[in-house]
Amino acid sequence: MRLKPSARLALFVAVAACASLAPPPGGPERKDPPRLVRVTPDSSALNFKSKDVTFLFDEVVSDRPTGGELEQLITISPRDGAPHVSWKRDRITVRPRKGFRKNTTYTVTLLPGITDLRGNVQKGSAQVTFSTGPELASGAILGRVFDWSSQNVAGLAWVEAISRPDSIVYVAVADTGGQFNIGPLPAGTYTVRAILDANKNRALDPTELWDSTHVVLTERRPFLELLAARRDSAGPRILTVVVQDSMTFRASFDRPIDPAQPFDTVHFHLFHADSTPMALASVRTSAQDTRAKQVADSTQHADSVKKAAAAAPPAAAKPPAPVDSVRLAPSTKLPPPKPSLPAPPTELVFRLAPGEKLEVSKAYRVTATETRNLVGRTKSSERVFTVPKPPVVKPAAADTSRKGPPPDSASKPKIPPP
């Protein structure tokens, strides 16, 4: 069947368009990632009236970047839901789900991850700020997010600043060092929340770590520290008990405890199996117990050094080292930042008072009264435990695999027959 000239032309155009999506044959293969040529509108533009923001690249980019959807590489602040993103060869256009609001300052961010047809990935980000009204907002909220329990920075955390009382949501993604910058923002009161968004859905799920605080934004740019941790409505309860020795045991809890919770013998108790109380000398977090040991060891070491110095004869003064022999220490890399507060405890160390003792094979009951979680919810719990028998150390078996040489019968003296 022969095609009409117009049909042949349409078929040729369609085939050519499809073929152009593949990497061009011949010539050196490009290894550079896509380069952003232009963003529309210009940064700091005023009275923006268009419906879309456009990112134009110097080559065709993929509509399915590595490791996710194209929508996950776009943030629009303020946010009204998932952005509307469209792709056409070398350009990406975006707009809010419900369109741009009047007289509002917007920040549109293109996150790292744009990929070309050869798999080259753009590792940098791009951002444009503009206003749909006659002026730009000038405020901003800066800060850093930490994973509080691990004491590490929380890179790529999802951060929201929710204005009060109108609940407009401004957003940003923290960088790999946990730092974020939400703005420009108008002056006002905001609830700032950081989420360790494990499933990348830009929402808080029950098992995810988070933190929030309130800030009144004026002309200054506050810097916040957000400590993401497990925060839910259930109070902590005792999960397991491990006996260390006859005077010490550890109790672990199923969720973090408020560090401001009193750890004392008023809220924590120990009983015999028949409910007879036992005296406790101290209840400490693991960090407090470690510090107490270090202080005790340091004091003991200092005392021994003083005694040794007092007993030893005075040493002769050493001459100062020549200038040429003094060398500066090599420069060291700065350690990563740490949160200002220690990790919230999930384990407590119990030490018995003098005269008390945990006996092998006997049962005991430890109780925790009104233990408080990180959002102020309390719970009382208890756990019965039995002191285990110490492990039996078997004597090492004799090594029969290495036998000595057989006796040399030739070396024995011969006894003549009678």
Image (cartoon, helix red, strand yellow):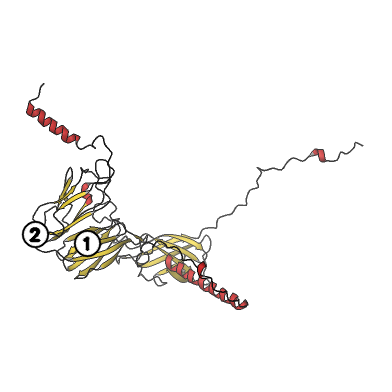
- Residue 147 vs residue 322, the one in the foreground: 322
Residue corresponding to mark 1 = 182
Foreground residue among 70 and 254: 70
| For residue 75, above or below residue 224 | above
Whether residue 305 appears in this view of the structure is: yes
The residue tagged with tag 2: helix, strand or loop?
Answer: loop
The single residue placed furthest to the top in the displayed view is 1
Horizontal side of 145 relative to 13 (left or right) equals right
Identify the residue at image location x=45%, y=71%: 282
Residue 30 against residue 154 in the figure, above or below: above
Quadrant, the C terminus? top right
The residue type indicated by label 1 comes to Ile
Residue behind mark 2:
47
Is 132 or 344 nearer to us in this picture? Answer: 132
The span from disc 2 to disc 1 (Cα, nearest Å) is 21 Å
List x then y, in percent, for residue 151. 37, 62
- Tell us which disc is closer to us: 2 or 1: 2
Please tell me how crowded label 1 is: few (under 14), some (14-19), or many (20+) other residues with Cα within 10 Å.
many
Q: Is residue 325 left or right of residue 147?
A: right
| Numbered mark located on residue 6 in the image | none
User: First in sequence: mark 2 or mark 1?
Assistant: 2
> Residue shown at 11%/64% (left/top)?
135
Q: Provide residue 344's location: percent of width, then percent of height.
A: 36, 64
- Amino acid under disc 2: Asn
Label 2 packing within 10 angstroms: few (<14), some (14-19), many (20+) = some
| Quarter of the image where one finds residue 208 | bottom left
Q: Label 1: state its secondary structure.
A: strand
The location of residue 127, given as percent across then percent down, is 20, 56
Q: Is residue 120 above or below residue 214?
A: above
**Residue 330 lies in what quarter of the image?**
bottom left
Where's residue 90, x and y in %?
18, 44
Q: Which image quarter is the N terminus in?
A: top left
